[in-house]
Amino acid sequence: MAQYTLALREVLVALGGALDFVGVDDLQHGKRVAVMAASCARYAQWPEEDCALLVALGLLHDCGVSSTRVHNRLVEEWDWRESQQHADRGAELLRECRLLSHLAEPVRYHHTHWCELKQLALAEQTRRFANLIFLVDRVDALRAQHICTQSTVPPPEYWAELIAPHAGQEFDPELYALFVSASANDAFWLQLAPDAVDDFLAEWAHAEGEVRVAFEDLLELGFMFANIVDSKSPFTFSHSLGVKAVAGFLAECLQLPLEERESVILAALLHDLGKLRVEDHMLEKPGPYDEQERRLMHRHVFDTWQLLKRIHGFEHVARIAAMHHETLDGQGYPQRLGAVDLPRAARIVAIADVFQALVQNRPYRSPMTLDAARDVMAQMVLRGKLDPQLVGVLFAHGEEAYQLARAHEAAVERQK
């Protein structure tokens, strides 16, 4: 297995950006939580490794949220009674990823009230970090509820007074006092502007050098975020996992070099990250999209590219992922690239994406049979959309590819 030289903090910032897409119109929630939590820790002169951990927690604390509807409830309601579900889901996802498993416990408890949290048998750091994330998360939710222009931004003490009644019950009184002191200046709030947030996180990401990361660890990250994307709608459930299974299978059939095969697999898992920015109702619409909806849906590929291209050492995977809706005739999107621009790896992911979508249940139709999917793809080949040789390989192993594309969805159907 290959190793990749990456700045892990760049990976976290990129993936945190993907999670923030769930807010659609309320972007950068996780990033603002990260900035506020780290600013409180630095004000208190906590060790730099604690500050770094709080940035990571802020970026990923809502990794259990895929749905725009859930995000809106979490922002619009101070203490939504179902909030623990996303905390538990996030912790479950993080535990399965070795690079991020140390974040699981604080994420699990980041909506737990202090009066309950202080009674639990947890490490002191877990309690403190979870509750600080909860506090600044609720502050950011309140900010989202207030429409502020530059001329109507409340003074710093406004937010401290707003959450004061919750100190002692929901928030550790000491953490509340820390927040009041750390936020009692204009700079604390001005740094939450989009450009300032990005500057803060770019500086944080570049403060740590690159490291060698094993493919297996990146694969776990890929599976984690594929699960987040696929959970956005019952009609996208298992899509990324199915695309990865089919693309990886084709790469094996073609006996691609190891590095190219791994790039195909990672790109397949991450190709739909940008769909987190698509509102739930669009993914669940039972009929065709109108022109505006189609344009909004098409931008998900560009958003995937914008996220992944910022990870140095990952550019090749980012390019492959961002080409999965390009076609050989140059009429795809978002760049209208032609055959000369599309490498073999990108063509494989595109074919796997089409095939898996055809055989998956969608709001406007039932899953296609293998024969029906073959007919559709054969027409796409004739129209110059898909690579004929690679589609031929898929057809030659059609039954196995079909089972792989449907495996996760079929397993759930058997459990019903």
Image (tube, rainbow, N blue to C red):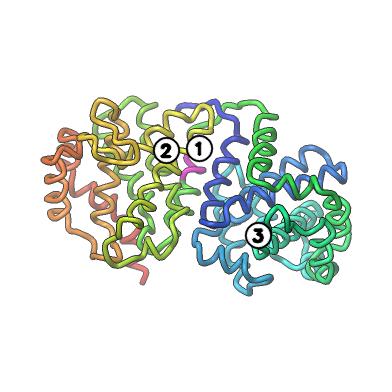
**Nearest to the observer: residue 127 or residue 300:** 300
Q: Amino acid at mark 1?
A: Leu
Give the side of residue 265 with respect to residue 154, left or right.
left
Whether 220 is among the magenta residues is yes
Q: In the rendering, at what x and y percent does residue 356 appear?
A: 28, 51
| Upstream in sequence: badge 3 or badge 1 | 3
Please, is residue 68 above or below residue 7 in the view?
below
Residue 293 in picture, x, y percent from top left: 35, 57
* Circles 2 and 1 in contact, beta carbons < 8 Å: yes
Point out the stretch of residues depicted in magenta. 218-222
Q: Which residue is mark 3?
A: 108
Circle 2 is placed at which residue position? 266
Q: Position of residue 325 (x, y in %)?
A: 30, 42
343 lies above or below 372 = above
Q: Which residue is mark 1?
A: 218
Q: Earlier in the sequence, mark 2 or mark 1?
A: 1
